[in-house]
Image: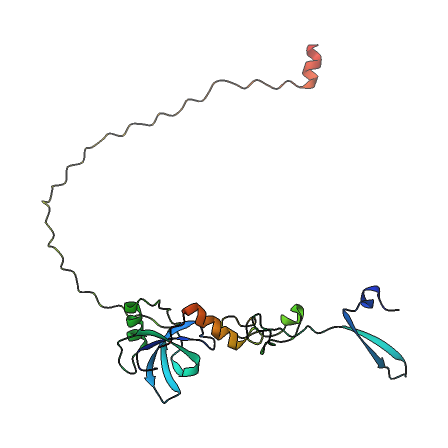
Amino acid sequence: MPQGNKRSKTFRKRTLRTPGGRLVVHHSKRKHKKLVCAKCGRPLLGVPRSDSLSKNKIKKSERNPKRPYGGVLCSVCSREQIKLEKGVENV
Amino acid sequence: MFEVGRVCVKIAGRDANNYCVVVKKLDDNYVIIEGNVRRRKCNIKHLHPQKKKLDIKEDATYKEVAAAFKKAGIPVKEKRGFKWKKEAAAPKEKAPREEKPVEKPKPKKQTEKKPVEKKAKSTKQKPKKTTKATKKTKK
């Protein structure tokens, strides 16, 4: 029997065959969902699919884009947002 | 539209949301920008033009652009590692000092040293402590 906390659906179960021919079940945490843009809902690029613990192991430059609204809005929506902030002054 | 002196806002990259000005036009698609961003070649798709236009010459330096920004009322971000050279101020003319009349030093008064009186030893003697044995004897 697995541990009580591992019987929930938060864990992903994998059945593996050992070298001795035995079937065992391995429990591992599920990967996080893809982050999406807060405005349009498109999946964000350049943001890793990882939980907060493994995020600390990644370099700071690899965590999210370094532009304003990086990791929250996609590139298209962030451009529109900046244009709105600075005023639409087309010449 | 993107001529020399045109103020723009950068909308892509890590310098996004900052004001810049076109310093040089390379071709129909690319310009060189300067201002609150790194001086660099930039695609015009990454720029949002504004109504303002600055009076600067082609290939203007950061110092000239910053001065023009201040004139136009655009906030200037100081670049990392850039130092403004202090202009040499004109030397101040010193007023001639008025010479004070030299006073003769006063002769010092000879004071006689008073002999220090030694404190007399206190004649009072501390009362002797009574021990238990003496108390007993008193009783």
Taking depth in this image into account, of A43 and A28 the one nearest to the observer is A43
| Image quarter of residue A28 | bottom right
Colouring scheme, one of rainbow, by chain, secondary structure, one colour: rainbow
Can residue A82 be seen in this snapshot? Answer: yes
Image spot of residue A6 (x, y percent): 81, 67
Residue extending furthest toward the right: A21
Residue extending furthest toward the top: B139
| Image quarter of residue B6 | bottom left
Image spot of residue A45 (x, y percent): 58, 78
Taking depth in this image into account, of B37 and A18 the one nearest to the observer is B37
In the picture, the quarter occupied by the N terminus of chain B is bottom left
Q: How many marks?
A: 0
Taking depth in this image into account, of A25 and A37 the one nearest to the observer is A37
In the picture, the quarter occupied by the C terminus of chain B is top right
Residue B136 vertical position relative to residue A51 in the rendered view, above or below: above
Q: In the shown orientation, is residue A47 left or right of residue B30?
A: right
Image spot of residue B30 (x, y percent): 39, 86
Q: In the shown orientation, is residue B35 left or right of residue A39?
A: left
Residue B133 vertical position relative to residue A71 in the rendered view, above or below: above
Residue at image position (78%, 71%) is A11
Image spot of residue B122 (x, y percent): 46, 20
Residue at image position (24%, 68%) is B87
Can residue A66 be seen in this snapshot? Answer: no
Residue B31 vertical position relative to residue A25 in the rendered view, above or below: below
Q: In the shown orientation, is residue B46 left or right of residue B1?
A: right
